Amino acid sequence: MVRHLVAGLLLTSAIALGAGCFETGPIFYPDGAECPAATDPVCSGDCTAADLVDPFQCDGQVCLLLQDNKQGVIGVCSTSCFVDEDCNPHGRCIQIPEGAFCLRACATDDDCYDATVCRAVAGTGTSFCLADLI
């Protein structure tokens, strides 16, 4: 058993942590982040957008696929929801034809992850991190 004192907190781990390393579990992509690329796509030749991403690396294990867009974003990580409280502090629960999902709310592009941009969504009164359609 190894014990580490970090910023006044005592951490206990079964293995020694490397210098500068404090995260020992899997790191998931938060809602609003671009969906991570699939490490081993199962398709050969004619891959669909869904074949190119790995939703299980997203915190909510959902990847909302986007239409072709100027930013080249295939999809954004999300979480299924019923109300805003089901989302992370920056998310809002939005109903789309496929169901209700958390989208990252924003005021400017700086509030968004990766290549996504802050755009107003009609009928919601809110802007979300999305992409510009081609």
Image (spheres, rainbow, N blue to C red):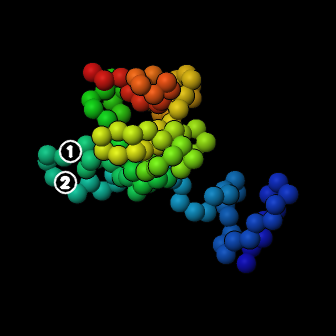
Q: Nearer the viewer, residue 83 or 70?
A: 83
Instruction: Please say whether residue 58 is visible from this viewpoint.
Output: no
Q: Quadrant of the N terminus?
A: bottom right
Callout 1 amino acid: Thr
115 is higher (above) or lower (below) than 95 = above
Q: Earlier in the sequence, mark 2 or mark 1?
A: 2
As drawn, the residue found furthest toward the left would be 45
- In the image: residue 9, left or right of residue 56: right
Where's residue 80, x and y in %? 43, 51
- Nearest the eye: 31 or 20: 31
Q: Give the amino acid type for the residue marked by disc 2 in the picture.
A: Cys
Q: Looking at the image, which residue sits at the far bottom?
A: 1
Mark 2 closeness class: few <14, some 14–19, many ≥20 residues within 10 Å: few
Q: How far across and down, in percent of the image, does residue 104 sit?
A: 51, 36
Residue that label 2 marks: 43
Label 1: few (<14), some (14–19) or many (≥20) C-alpha neighbours in 10 Å: few
Residue 39 versus residue 132 in the image, above or below: below
48 with respect to 53 (left or right): left
Q: Position of residue 40 (x, y in %)?
A: 30, 56
In the image, taking residue 48 as reference, residue 124 lies left or right, namely right
Return the residue at label 1: 48
Q: Which of the pair 113/4 is nearer the observer?
A: 113
Q: Residue at x 78, y 70 (%)?
A: 3
Dot 2: element = loop
Q: Secondary structure at mark 1?
A: loop
Q: Which mark is residue 118?
A: none
Q: Give the Cα separation between the discs numbered 2 and 1.
A: 8 Å
Q: Residue at x 36, y 23 (%)?
A: 132
| Quadrant hosting residue 123 | top left
Farthest residue, direction right:
8
Query: Eyeballing the image, is 121 above or below 1?
Result: above
